[in-house]
Amino acid sequence: MTDNYAKIVQDNLSRLYSNLPKDLAKNLPGEQDEERFIFDAFGEKCVIEPKRITLGEKEHSSVFGILISLYALNACSDICVPSPLKSFKEFPDSMPYVGAFATHTEKL
């Protein structure tokens, strides 16, 4: 019997392999060996296959499997540029809460 984590990982792998990006190995970055993708994750060798994810010597259908499968689904060649950070006061409609926020977080 599979747990919910395994179902999520299998769903993510099915989505990944149903529309496999041609440059996935480059975006991970890693190498492709037929249907397998091999790269480093969490300081260990990671292998993504159509039916499973192996991290080190263990097959993972836990949180690691979910994170790795989501990473593979969303890997792209674009450079990640975070938007400029904002202070709490700069968010719309936050002015009534600024005093409480400052009292309970900034001035502890």
Image (cartoon, rainbow, N blue to C red):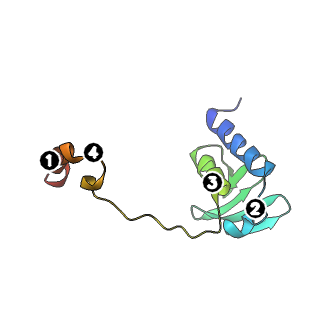
Which type of secondary structure does the marked residue at label 2 adopt? strand
Q: Which mark is residue 37?
A: 2
Tags 4 and 1 touching, CB below 8 Å: no
- Name the residue at 78% across, 56% down: 20
* Local SS, label 1: helix
Query: Disc 3 on helix, strand or loop?
Result: helix
* Residue 48 sits in quarter: bottom right
Distance Cα–Cα, label 4 vs label 1: 13 Å
How far apart are the alpha carbons under marks 2 and 1? 51 Å
Question: From the viewer's perspective, is 76 left or right of 99?
Answer: right
Q: Amino acid at mark 4?
A: Asp
Residue 70 % position (x, y): 62, 51
**Amino acid under disc 2:** Phe
Q: Residue at x 19, y 43 (%)?
A: 96
In the figure, 38 relative to 55: above or below? below
Q: Are marks 2 and 4 in contact (CB under 8 Å)?
A: no
Q: Nearer the viewer, residue 104 or 41?
A: 104
Along the line of sight, the residue nearer the viewer: 98 or 66: 98
Residue tagged 3? 68
Residue on which disc 4 sits = 93
- Residue 81 drawn at (x, y percent): 49, 68
Query: Which residue matches tag 1?
Result: 99
Which is in the foreground here, disc 3 or disc 1?
1
Q: Earlier in the sequence, mark 2 or mark 4?
A: 2
